[in-house]
Image (tube, helix red, strand yellow):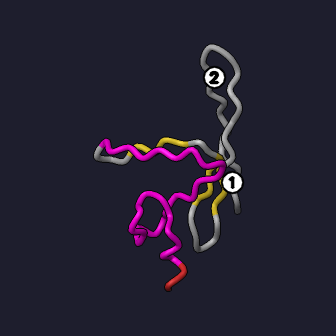
Amino acid sequence: MSRTPKITRITGDGECDARVVRQVRGGPILVEGPVRIVAEDGAEVESDRFVVAVCRCHRSALYPLCDTSHRAL
């Protein structure tokens, strides 16, 4: 049985548009940019691209950004 996740809209001073995030089977997570990614250790990576691929396999030399290393499997 599949459950639908609870959807919560967070707003500040005004309505904000939600970013689109897509999971790619066997690949990265695609996020509409620009984005700033904050790692567990506090390191930050910024990208101003219109779509940013975020690594899920931890094989990327550009981690947390995807460099398509997952394709070598």
Going by the image, does 47 lie left or right of 41?
A: right
* Residue 3 tag number: 1
Residue depth check, mark 1 versus mark 2: number of the one nearer the observer: 2
**Residue 35 falls in which quadrant of the image?**
top right
Q: Residue at x 66, y 41 (%)?
A: 19
Q: Residue at x 51, y 76 (%)?
A: 70
Q: Quadrant of the N terminus?
A: bottom right
User: What amino acid is labelled 2 in the image?
Assistant: Thr
Q: CA distance from mark 1 to mark 2?
A: 25 Å
User: What amino acid is labelled 1 in the image?
Assistant: Arg
Q: Secondary structure at mark 2?
A: loop
**Residue 26 falls in which quadrant of the image?**
bottom right
Going by the image, does 20 lie left or right of 48?
A: right
Q: Secondary structure at mark 1?
A: loop
Indicate the position of residue 18 as horizontal and vertical percent values: 69, 36
Assess disc 2: are there few (<14), some (14-19) or many (≥20) residues with their C-alpha within 10 Å of its C-alpha: few
Going by the image, does 34 lie left or right of 15?
A: left
Identify the residue position indicated by label 2 in the image.
11
User: Disc 1 or 2, which lies upstream in sequence?
Assistant: 1
Q: Is residue 34 magenta?
A: no
**Magenta span:** 42-70
Q: Is residue 50 magenta?
A: yes
**Vertical arrangement, residue 64 with respect to residue 27, above or below:** above
In the displayed orientation, state which residue is furthest to the bottom.
Answer: 73
Indicate the position of residue 52 as horizontal and vertical percent values: 58, 54
Indicate the position of residue 53 as horizontal and vertical percent values: 57, 59
Assess disc 1: are there few (<14), some (14-19) or many (≥20) residues with their C-alpha within 10 Å of its C-alpha: few
Indicate the position of residue 63 as horizontal and vertical percent values: 41, 61
Q: Residue at x 56, y 64 (%)?
A: 28
